[in-house]
Every structure is written in C-alpha cells, then in structure tokens.
Image: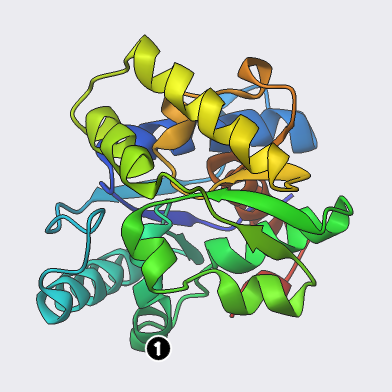
Amino acid sequence: MKKKIIGILGGMGPESTAIFYHALIKQCQEQYGAQYDEDYPEIFIYNLPIPDVVEGLKNEQKTLEMLVQGAKKVDSIGVDVLVMPCNTVHYFYPDMAKSISTPFICIFLATAKKIKSEGYKKVGFLATDTTITQKSYDKDFERNGIDLIFPDEQEKVTSIIMNILAGKKLDEDKTELKRIIQALQEKGAEAIVLACTDLPILLKQEDVNIKIFDTVEILAEATVEYAIGKIGDEILE
C-alpha cells in the first residue's frame, strides 16, 4: 500500500503538535495494522513559532505572512498532504490553502463531518477567544446541520488554555472545565467539541459523562484516511 507523505505545520502550541504526532501513529496502527517502522508514512514536522493568537489577532497580517511562508516551506519538501493541528490559526486556512499546491486538510470540515456522521445536532463548544469571535467554525457546522452552544465563562476557558500552553496542567483547571461542560449540558449540549488542540492535554473522555469530540484525534484520523486513500478531497475546503 502506497502511503502519502504527510507534512505537519505545528508549534501552535508545541505540545499539542507532539500529541498530534502520537495520534497519527496510533491511527496508523488502528486503521491498517501498522507494526514495523516501514509500515508508517513519511512525516515531516515544522515547528513554527508565531505571535499569540489565543486571546486575539494582535498582528493579523504578520501572522498570516508567517503561516503562508511556513506552509510554503513544508510544501517545498515534497509532501503529499499538509495538516495544521491548531484550530485558532485555521482562521487563515483559505489564504494559506491558496498559497500552496499541496492538498491541505481543513480541521473545521473534518470535525463537522465527524460530528454529523455520529448524529449529533447540538454541541458545546470550547475554543479560544479568536476561534469564537472570528466565527471560524460557523460555516462548516451550519452546512452540516450542527448548532453551537457557547460557554458563559469564555474568559475562564481562555485562562485554562493559556495555563496549558505554559505547561501548567492544574487539577483546579480540570475541575473548572468539567463544571463548564456541565453548564453546557444544562443548556442543551448533546456532546462537547474540544475545538482547541491544547485542551485534550488536560481533559479526556473518561473525565466526563458526555461525548467528547477531540479535534486532535479527528484531524489525525482524517489525515491517515487521506494518506492511505480511504477518503479523498471531501475534507479539503
């Protein structure tokens, strides 16, 4: 089986990129029984440090230029598919995708299709301020008949994400996240989307009694499916 070469534009944040790489390896094992080194695809990771985007887009043009250059650098290696395991900077996806010739998997579309395939209509949405204020997910979720329910305490979610980025995995933050999730359930959420790839570092499915859609796992699953030809351009915007 010929596998596509995967390029990862990461570093946003660095730890979630490492977790995404591990998720890719697990998906290879689960999807087609990878066992030996030769069973896995070629994978290139480029860790790109960009200005903070969690709390807002302070220098949008500079950030876009850096991301486009990063995408072009990965593209130039000769990869067959590009992925970027960060929800927040996917706001720049359209301009980035236009700048390269390599197929670029969209985390928004992959997540929307996954949720729709499992029959959920109303989901609680945990993400950065930027992802929410820029309405990054709205179009793909509307197309797939999914309603978003947002937390009343977004500033607390942001504070937790910033702590994770700083390497602080605090028990009190996990408790707060679980409380916020409970409040989203009370508002009608049938499932919860961790629409920030840093949140799964702190919160796992076993921590709560509601279905969790982890965008790290969703993107990893879609990437491997694309790499082995199981799916095609339906996960590209």
* Residue shown at the point (82%, 60%) measured from the top left: 116
Q: Residue at x 44, y 47 (%)?
A: 196
Q: Is residue 192 left or right of residue 79?
A: right
> Judging from the image, what secondary structure is the residue with disc 1 in?
helix
Please state the horizontal and vertical placement of residue 127, each as a whole percent of the image: 44, 51
Render colour scheme: rainbow
User: On the image, which quarter does residue 169 sit in?
Assistant: top left
Marker count (numbered): 1
- Tell me, yes or no, if residue 97 can be seen here: yes
Q: Quadrant of the C terminus?
A: bottom right
Instruction: List the single residue furthest toward the right.
Output: 119
What amino acid type should be assigned to the residue bearing mark 1? Answer: Lys
> Can you give x and y, in whole percent of width and height, for residue 88 in the image?
36, 60
Residue at 75%, 65% in the rendered image: 146
Q: Is residue 15 above or below residue 92?
A: above
Which of the 4 quarters of the picture holds residue 119?
A: bottom right
**Residue 93 shown left or right of residue 143 in the figure:** left
Left-right relation of 23 to 67: right
Q: Dot 1: within a 10 Å radius of its alpha carbon, few (fewer than 14), some, or many (20 or more) residues?
A: few
Depth check: give the residue in front, 70 or 197: 197
Where is residue 58 drawn, in percent x and y?
12, 69
Q: Position of residue 158 (x, y in %)?
A: 31, 44
Tell me if I can see residue 78 in this picture: no
Residue occupying image coordinates x 63% and y 42%: 184
Q: Quadrant of residue 186?
A: top right
Residue that carries the numbered disc 1 in the rendered image: 98
